[in-house]
Image (cartoon, helix red, strand yellow):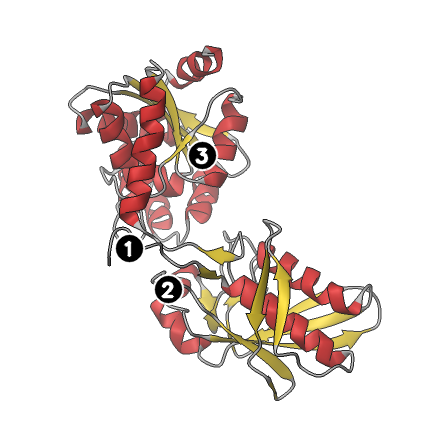
């Protein structure tokens, strides 16, 4: 792929489900199934998606993932809408859409694997048509059961098909070179301003949690995505001396394991890092086994808490910070904080508070 080619964005399964549901709602209200519908994303962007006709009581939309490499690209997402008395919107998983069977995800056990943001998008799209009426919305995908085998759903305890996902409504292609270049430019703006310390988070939710946990409002936070190693390398190369790295255990456990590319398809070691420290701390074999068998980082968080092992987060933060410094031969001093999605600091290195104060005090 040419490096100067602008990669084409696509639509999330959540956007496709919302569009299909809007078309099906129109059909339920007596209108014909439209050729295309508009849906509004959480970013208040308006997408016009073509509708793949009406069949067996549902309308369909074919997912276009743009230039992203996505297992669900080209999959058909269908929606059926049944009007109900009352004002509630109910969600059901049809053929090819999974159901949640394990705790630790964003949805309760037994619920259709339609994530919270897509649910909001679907309800908004349906309400545009039916107003305050109630409805049962059934999302399905004829190819979903087979496609799900190529996703992480089986490991997460989502059975029966794909998940309906998306936080922005769009799919941004993973152009690694552009991401790394943008990150270098951002780090360089700090270095060029004479700064010696920056805060680093993995993504948007992590940045929000880091800012809230350490009351950082006056400075930009560098988002490194899955490329924490690149952020450390470039910070050292450009003359920075200190990094405050905050993140969810799902990412930072990999750093503690010495993995600096944290994408699920590339980096691992999080279970091993957690279980090794639990065993060293004297946790019983059954507890270590339970930690190792956790399917998600949220499940591991609960297991650590229930096992009385919360002190491990401080230990793992120190290990992760040491790994970061060793990567650049001591040219960078790192402070590391494990932070959950509610901005609670689970554990941190002793220098994290002073690093945050230094960042807050810089103009």
Task: Tell me: 246 left or right of 277.
Answer: right
* Residue 94: % across, % down: 57, 77
Q: Residue furthest front?
A: 4
Q: Describe the element under mark 1 as helix, strand or loop.
A: loop
Q: Earlier in the sequence, mark 2 or mark 3?
A: 2
Q: Which residue is tagged 2?
A: 70
Q: Describe the element under mark 2 as helix, strand or loop.
A: loop
Q: Describe the element under mark 3 as helix, strand or loop.
A: loop
Q: Which residue is tagged 1?
A: 265
Determine the residue positioned at 33% across, 62% down: 69
Work out how far the residue at label 3 is from the one at label 1, CA to CA, in angstroms.
31 Å
Work out how far the residue at label 2 is from the one at label 3, CA to CA, in angstroms.
39 Å
Q: Which residue is tagged 3?
A: 308
* Residue 65: % across, % down: 42, 64
**Viewer-closest of 193 and 21:** 193
The reply to whether dot 1 and dot 2 touch (C-beta < 8 Å) is: no
């Amino acid at each position: 792929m040419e490096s100067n080619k602008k990669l084409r964005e696509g639509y999330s399964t959540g956007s496709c489900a919302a569009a299909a549901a809007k078309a099906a709602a129109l059909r339920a209200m007596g209108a014909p199934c439209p050729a295309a519908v508009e849906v509004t994303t959480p970013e208040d962007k308006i997408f016009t998606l073509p509708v793949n006709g009406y069949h067996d009581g549902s309308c369909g939309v074919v997912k276009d993932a743009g230039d992203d490499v996505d297992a669900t690209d080209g999959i058909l997402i269908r929606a059926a809408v049944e009007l109900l008395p009352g004002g509630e919107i109910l969600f059901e998983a049809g053929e090819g859409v999974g159901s949640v069977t394990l705790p630790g995800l964003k949805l309760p056990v037994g619920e259709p694997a339609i994530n919270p943001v897509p649910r909001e998008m679907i309800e908004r799209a349906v309400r545009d048509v039916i107003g305050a009426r109630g409805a049962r919305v059934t999302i399905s995908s004829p190819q979903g059961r087979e496609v799900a085998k190529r996703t992480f759903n089986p490991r997460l305890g989502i059975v029966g098909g794909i998940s309906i996902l998306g936080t922005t409504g769009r799919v941004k292609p993973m152009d690694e070179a552009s991401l790394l270049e943008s990150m270098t430019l951002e780090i360089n703006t700090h270095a060029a301003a004479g700064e010696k310390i920056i805060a680093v988070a993995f993504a948007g939710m992590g940045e929000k949690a880091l800012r809230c946990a350490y009351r950082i409002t006056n400075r930009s936070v560098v988002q490194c995505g899955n490329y924490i190693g690149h952020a450390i390398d470039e910070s050292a190369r450009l003359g920075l001396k200190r990094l405050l790295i905050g993140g969810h255990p799902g990412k930072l456990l990999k750093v503690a394991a010495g993995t600096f590319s944290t994408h699920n398809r590339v980096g691992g070691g999080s279970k091993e890092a957690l279980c090794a420290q639990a065993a060293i701390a004297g946790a019983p074999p059954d507890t270590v086994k339970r930690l190792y068998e956790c399917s998600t980082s949220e499940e591991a968080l609960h297991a650590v808490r229930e096992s009385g092992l919360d002190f491990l987060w401080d230990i793992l933060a120190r290990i992760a910070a040491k790994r970061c410094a060793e990567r650049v031969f001591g040219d960078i001093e790192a402070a590391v904080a494990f932070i959950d999605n509610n901005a609670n600091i689970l554990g941190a290195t002793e220098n994290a508070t002073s690093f945050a104060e230094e960042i807050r005090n810089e103009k």
